[in-house]
Amino acid sequence: MQKTFIRYTFAIITSAIFLIFFINLLITLHTLESQQYNKFYTKSEQVIHTLETNQAELAILQKNLDEDYLTRAKAAAYIFDTQEEITMNVDEMEYLAKLLNVDELHVIDENGFIVAASVSRYVGFDMSKHEQTRPFLAMLEKDKEQDYLIQEAQPNAADNKIMQYIGVTRKEKKGIVQVGFKPTRQLEAKARNTYEYIFSRFPTDSGEELFAVDRSTGDILGHSDGMDTDFSASYYQPEQLLECTKGSYKKEKNGNSMYVVVREYGNILIGLAIPQNNLTGQLFKQVFNTLWYLLLIEAIVLILLNYLVKRKVVNGIHLIIQNLIDITNGNLDTTVTAGNNPELKALSSGINTMVKSIISISDRISAIIKISGIPLAAFEYQLDVQHVFITSGFKELLDISEQKTKELCQDSILFDKYIKSIINNPLKGETDIFQINDGKYVRIHMSESSNTNLGVIIDISKDMIEKQQMQYENTHDFLTKLYKYSYFKQLAAERLQHMSPENVCAIVMLDLDYFKSINDTFGHDIGDKYLQHFSNVMLSMPSEHFLSARRSGDEFCMMLFNCNDKNDITEYLNQFYQALEQTPVQLSDSQSKVICASSGFAWTSDLNADIDELLNCADEALYDIKRETKGRFGEYHMS
């Protein structure tokens, strides 16, 4: 009888478990697809909102810049019409262009020729010879006073570089005054308004793709992984995508199935695709976990039923079940009892112990959540209890291996030493922030009592990296990567105060010779390269003796410290000038040049010397050198 009862019970429970498993499989699959669809809809809303916001900002920016540069063009025309003494040579035109804060300035006569320009090679250019310049000639034909033309940004006729030109007609004589500028801000704004750029700012799950397709042409307008992907798969084709507005499975080029969701936005199809394996992986993980739990419960129930039937304690079972129902309903103060049967008494006692443990665990988890207030990893341990409780994410936050995590969780004393080794070494200037590795920073809060230690760990890597980046930008020059002048003075003053009494130091002021002619001849880009090359040489000098900074423009400064005497100072300066001579800068394909720089230095052994005074003395020495010669350094001498 006992075997028959157990056999039928086993068959019924097993059938119920597999029925539940199948229903759960269908429900979970539908839930995962719905979650993916909702996630995509949220992301597409964000994409559309970003596009529309960027478009509005771009329109406002373009309008404001057009009005601003039209005003500058009219101002230039007014100057030429009212100031007859203007010679309109290249130097004067360049000066007026800088005064008006434009990149180019041209004067066009009644025949359509550029008769004056801030760029010498443009003088004499025939405006009728190129489709970019030809529209401005229509202004001469209209003969309309103060007519103007605002041209869209496009490659210019002379150099094929992207420029925007604005022209206005002159009042006093027939002709046009034209200004040009590099549309950097417009191009940057347009670049931020592409699907590819916007998709790159959105986080995607493993294997997940965001993309946009032109419905008319089938062209891919953007992709979350860039535009190097092979877009031959069927689900990138507009006719296939239109079948996916509610979500559908499509084949990838290699035969793998993708779950694809598409949303129409005007003539654009915005889509999301995720491998079906990702969904089925989540599906099987969830439903098979449920299956294992159900089978485990089945085994426990069968063992318990076999025991109770064998011992004929049905009344005791009913009493225990009633107590368990009360506990399930939330009455955790219920004490399970089972009459006088010693075995059932032991079972009752075990259940009561388990309930107390659950209550205790619940209290501890509540305390951890109360401490954190945000998503976090938490831990709890007692030194007299071997096992350590941790939440998920612990090993990721502290960047430790799975094996080490297991070792720490199995030994509370070892865990305590590990945590204390981190807490005892906070980040400089902080009390509860700790650096785990080069890119990982965490904040750890600890709550210690007589027998229990609770802690929470918060990942603040992003905030710390942004803070460090901000500190770097506040103290370093963007172009040359050298220290900014104000920060250099602060560091120099600190080094002077901490200098050994046996040592001397020097402040050096440097100025690049002939830099303006390099800018004028080869352009500002080469000029910037020239400055960067010079700063790279400064940065290559030994950091234990050199502290370098950019003062402004082509002016630089250095501090030479940890020097034994004046001879050391001149030796280090000779070493610097030798490095300049050995590393010429390439100005063009056929021409290179050794950087020529003049410098003056003032040295001292006084720990209380004033940095500003030393800088002024070094500046005087620099000017003395530049008056006498160039490309050398000289010492400051009191007059």
Image (cartoon, helix red, strand yellow):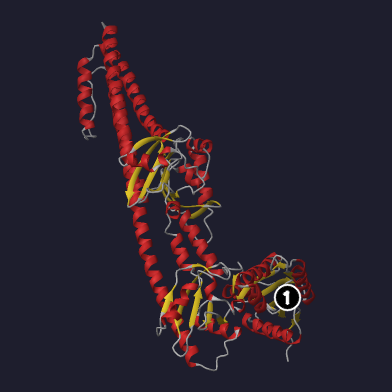
Q: Quadrant of residue 565?
A: bottom right
Q: Position of residue 546 (x, y in %)?
A: 69, 69
Q: Nearer the viewer, residue 636 or 537?
A: 537
Q: Position of residue 505 (x, y in %)?
A: 71, 75
Q: Nearer the viewer, residue 449 or 395?
A: 395
Vertical order, 68 against 473 (above or below): below
Vertical order, 628 against 192 (above or below): below
Q: Position of residue 269 (x, y in %)?
A: 36, 47
Instruction: Say which residue appears at 33% left-offset and 20% top-offset.
Output: 300
Vertical order, 294 against 382 (above or below): above
- Judging by the rendered image, the residue that carries numbered circle 1 is 596
Mark 1 burial class by Cα count in 10 Å: few <14, some 14-19, many 20+ = some
Instruction: Say what amino acid the circle numbered 1 marks.
Output: Cys
Instruction: Say which residue appears at 34% left-offset and 28% top-offset.
Output: 290
Left or right relative to 228: residue 338: left
Q: Position of residue 242 (x, y in %)?
A: 33, 42
Viewport quadrant of the C terminus: bottom right
Q: Nearer the viewer, residue 336 or 260?
A: 260
Viewport quadrant of the N terminus: top left
Q: Nearer the viewer, residue 121 or 192?
A: 121
Left or right relative to 362: residue 92: right
Left or right relative to 38: residue 86: right
Q: Quadrant of residue 92?
A: bottom right
